[in-house]
Amino acid sequence: MTFVGDVRVEAVRGPDIGARLADVARLRIAVFRDWPYLYDGDEDYEAQYLSTYVRSTDSVFVLAVDGDRVVGASTGLPLADEEPAFLAPFAERGIDASQVFYCGESVLLPAYRGRGLGHAFFDRREAHARALGRFDWTAFAAVDRDAADPRRPRDHRGNEGFWTKRGYVRQPEMTMRLSWKEVGDHHESEKPLTFWLRPLEAA
């Protein structure tokens, strides 16, 4: 357990994350409703998506907690424990999925941004992957949106610069497609997400 200012950062691992599923689902629904995901979330979708992390013995939730309230969460698990859609771009690239730790996503309430918690989320997930001792890479995927999309807020600042400073490199040829329902839509539709990779140095 560590602190970033007054916010406690703690890791919950493997099957123990079940007790925190509701907290993470709530944050995902709230934060991903905004650009660029525009996710119109529901509890059934969340239960299905997050069940992958419960089944993985080496998964991790990194939580930001203010008092008793979970205000941010970051997820990760061995890529080999993910669904086939996540593995396919790596197989096509000739990268063994067993050598990759997948950093799922980070969600943080707006009032807590800009305090260094984003770095703490990556630090703890990368440390978790390093401690497992069998990974050469960490990776994540980010949704692709048209810069000219009229729904894009004028004051939106992307995370690309932050990710690049963390050592991640976007891989334009490594893309997958996932489906979710956007705000204002009645049905799910596919969206492209592109992977970013970083070599994982030894401990």
Image (tube, rainbow, N blue to C red):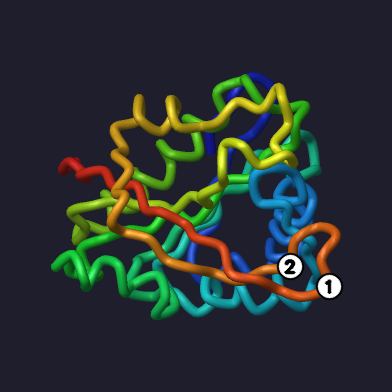
**Which residue is at the front of the view, 4 or 139?**
139
Name the image quarter holding residue 85. Answer: bottom left
Residue tagged 2: 181
The amino acid on which the numbered mark 1 sits, given as a three-letter code, is His
Gap in Å between the C-alphas at discs 2 and 1?
Answer: 7 Å
Residue at 74% over, 41% down: 151
Question: In the rendered image of this protein, does residue 160 appear above or below residue 37?
Answer: above
For label 2, the SS is strand
Question: What element does badge 1 sit on?
Answer: loop
Residue 171, compared with residue 57, is above or below; it is above
Residue 181 location (% of width, % of height): 74, 67
Picture disc at residue 186 = 1
* Disc 2 crowd, CA 10 A, few/some/many (<14, 14-19, 20+): some
Percent position (x, y) of residue 190? 58, 69
Which residue is pictured at 70% across the width and 22% down the height? Answer: 155
Query: How far from the left and from the top, in percent, is residue 64?
Result: 65, 39
Q: Earlier in the sequence, mark 2 or mark 1?
A: 2
| Residue 93 lies in quadrant | bottom left
User: In front here: 194 or 17?
Assistant: 194
Q: Is residue 97 visible?
A: yes
